[in-house]
Image: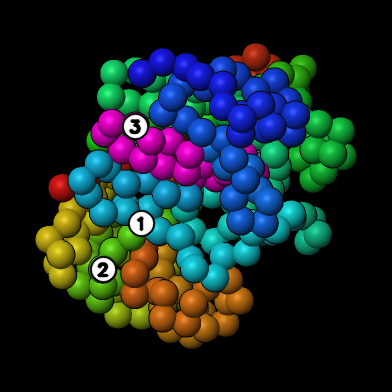
Amino acid sequence: MGTRQTTTEVTMSAIVPHLPELPSSVELGMGPGGLTVARVFGPAGSAEIYLRGAHLSTWTPTGGTPVIWMSEQSEYAPGVPLRGGVPICFPWFGAHPTDATAPSHGFARLADWQLAEAREAGDDVVLVFLLTDTEATRASAWPHPFEARYTVTVGATLSLSLRVTNRGSTKLSFEEALHTYLAVADIRQTEVAGLEGAPFTDRLTGPRPAESTPVRFDAETDRIYLNNPATTTVTDASTGRVITVAKQGSASTVVWNPWIDKAAAMADFGDTEYTGMVCVETCNIRDNAITLAPGESHEISVSYSAA
């Protein structure tokens, strides 16, 4: 595949600064709500990534079914996070510990990222997004100079890598998560394996001892596993599909499903959509937060495959 410059690309270059030359497998256009979206049509897989939040909303291996879940009720509007896909939580996870006005899960998922690179590598398509500190972030609850480099590799597998560099003169600490929503046919017939034997915190009831069986779902589930770099598998017995989640540079995993009441309480989540998704999140949060000296970098990465 070669490169080209389409009419859409010419128009987008007036909207998106520093637009790189795009290979023929990548198109940049407008999505719902006027949000800019990069659409990937690779030989081994397709995907969509919004520049707002560098938010991957879909990934489908060629010949397969969608692996990433998005809510049909998601809002596409400035200042509103998307519901589903892969939100990037940075530089904090959940509510900010001291600033009640700070956005949940940090500012990265609400910021406009720069598409810095798009290229083909065999059957894969690689996109690189950049986010750096701005006047707004320096005036926020986390004022540090930084660079975040997010690499998305779309193919028969999906690989995501977030590399954060401390560009300041003092040390900084942060939490991070790739808050991935995975698509399943029926959550009631789904299990998450690989976390057996690991203690966890149930955000609904508190610390819990390790369990010897995979995570199964019959109620709201919100679990945090710390000090756990394990690979996990998500098996949907109703279809036989197994999604493997293999991570590096991550010491925390979160498993979440809102179930009936919480799904009904969320405006951007359909009342019955909880049956079709599960979050298995690749994180460094709480006691596993990252601290970087000036000039240091840290990379968290994860790959997804479906069989």
Q: Residues within 10 Å of mark 2 (few under 14, many from 20)?
A: some
In the image, what residue type sits under mark 3? Gly
Tag 2: amino acid: Ala
Q: Circle 1 sits on which residue?
A: 182
Q: CA distance from mark 1 to mark 2?
A: 10 Å
SS at badge 1: strand
Q: Viewer-nearest of labels 2 and 3?
A: 3
The amino acid beneath tag 1 is Leu
Q: Residue at x 54, y 49 (%)?
A: 87
Is most of the magenta stretch helix, strand or loop? strand
Q: Residue at x 38, y 53 (%)?
A: 68
> Viewed as shown, does residue 286 lie left or right of 182?
right
Q: Which mark is residue 291?
A: none
For the residues labelled 2 and 3, the Cα–Cα distance comes to 25 Å
Vertical placement of residue 8 versus 175, above or below: above
| Residue 194 percent coordinates (x, y) | 22, 51
Q: How many marks?
A: 3
- Of the 4 image quadrants, the one containing the N terminus is top left
Tell me if 226 is positioned left or right of 162 in this view.
left
12 or 101: nearer the eye?
12
**Mark 2 sits on what residue?**
185
In the image, the segment drawn in magenta is 39-56
| First along the sequence among labels 2 and 3 | 3
